Amino acid sequence: MAGCGQKSATFNFDDFTDHQSFKLNTLQTTPFGPAWADIVAKPENFLLCKGAPIALCYYSGPEGTMTPCVSDKQHPGRADCTCYEIPAGSPYLVDINAILNLDVYLDTVKTCGHGGEDCLPKGKQLAPVCDFINNNTLIPGADLISTFSLFLEPTMPTTQQTTCGTPSPYAGCMTGPCKRTGGFDATTGLPLVECSCPTYDGPYQVSQDLSVTGNKCVLGDPFLWSAAYAPQPGGKISPPSAPPCYPDVPGDNGCPLLSPNPPNIPPPPADIDCNKVCSEYQNTNKAGVEIGFTCDATLCTAAKGDLNLVTEACAGLQNGPVGEILKLETEVGYSCAASQICGCAPTKETNDEIFNLNQSQRATGISPQCDLNGTLCGTPQ
């Protein structure tokens, strides 16, 4: 059981925060281990968020890869892991049992329940931890926070997992603090970041079928896996089965765009406040462009070759609320569609920018939403 192993909080946050504004969560958040053990006792433990760019450490570990994890010999109980930066706007998932900020953990449990069942995607509320990550206040001093994302699912499926049953040290990166490095991975088209991850000694699941890759459960020192542990029989680190799809996520797990052309637009659910949805779309950047519209126009049709365009179009999305948008799209099962369902109209400046973004996607061989379903077309200048 993962409860065996280190019992005290040895993770050192000195590089990221002063201790006056941050309290490390040292609670035994499950019977199987503390917060930094990254326990997923049931899929509902994953909370759905949207807004900020995040770090994805799920694939990190072995030597010789773009994303290794190395034990920090100067700080026992810590590992330095190279991870992918996932652009703003793409939804991400947070394990409620692995929130390293004590105050935020207690606030989130109060709202979502101990298992997370009262918050998105299974429930109807937005988890408080989402706002702290979007506001970049979960761990002061970090550039971004490590969470879980399905962004790379089409090419690096999360179904390829191995359970390592013999207790060994692993890096529990969930909600760990990360710094940008300027590194870049050409294979995924994503920036690389460095994350400080607490380590835990216990059984765990890794992101590979080791019988195929030839890697081992215990990597050669100083390397170790970024991992988590699902203790249920046949345990898998996987998102909740409900909803049937995730809005704004690529691949089979993602919700479709509105279709056909012109689209059949469903009515908003009764519990959705469309005035609130449209107000969330009105968050603007310094140029006066409404970020929610431009992000929708690029994110759900993006390909590896235009992720810089997505980063530009979605920059600053985390600076305003997006919870009602996420709630609506989760309930109706469509991606990048909330503005159409609620009838939110972009400004002239925003429409001009949408048109330019569509032209940029076409120039790289991508069909924007406008070409697929006649929405978010913008206006030529």
Image: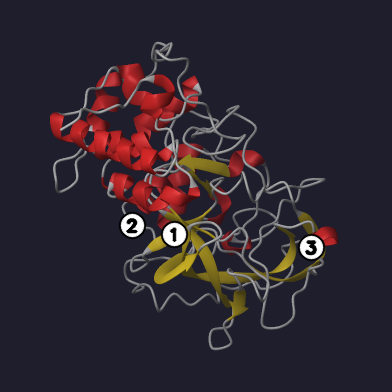
For residue 10, which quarter of the picture?
bottom right
Q: Which mark is residue 369?
A: none
Circle 3 is placed at which residue position? Answer: 213
**Residue type for callout 2:** Asn
Q: Residues under labels 3 and 2: Cα distance?
A: 36 Å
Q: Horizontal placement of 222 versus 372: left or right? A: right
Task: Note whether 158 is above or below 297 in the view shown.
Answer: below
Residue at image position (82%, 45%) is 233
Q: Is residue 337 visible?
A: no
Q: Nearer the viewer's eye, disc 3 or disc 2? A: 3
Circle 2 is placed at which residue position? Answer: 136
Q: Horizontal placement of 80 versus 223: left or right? A: left
Task: Decide: few, some or many residues near mark 3? Use Cα within 10 Å; few <14, some 14-19, many ≥20.
Answer: few
Q: Nearer the viewer's eye, disc 3 or disc 1? A: 3
Counting from the top left corner in percent of width and height, residue 71 is at 61, 80
Residue at image position (65%, 32%) is 241
**Residue type for callout 3:** Thr
Q: Residue furthest bottom?
A: 74
Task: Decide: few, some or many residues near mark 2? Use Cα within 10 Å; few <14, some 14-19, many ≥20.
Answer: some
Circle 1 is placed at which residue position? Answer: 145
Between 152 and 19, which is closer to the camera in this rendering?
152
Between 304 and 35, which is closer to the camera in this rendering?
304
Q: Residues under labels 2 and 1: Cα distance?
A: 8 Å
Task: Note whether 79 is above or below 249 in the view shown.
Answer: below
Residue at image position (40%, 30%) is 336
| Comes first in the chain, label 3 or label 1 | 1
Tag 1 secondary structure: strand
Tag 3 secondary structure: helix
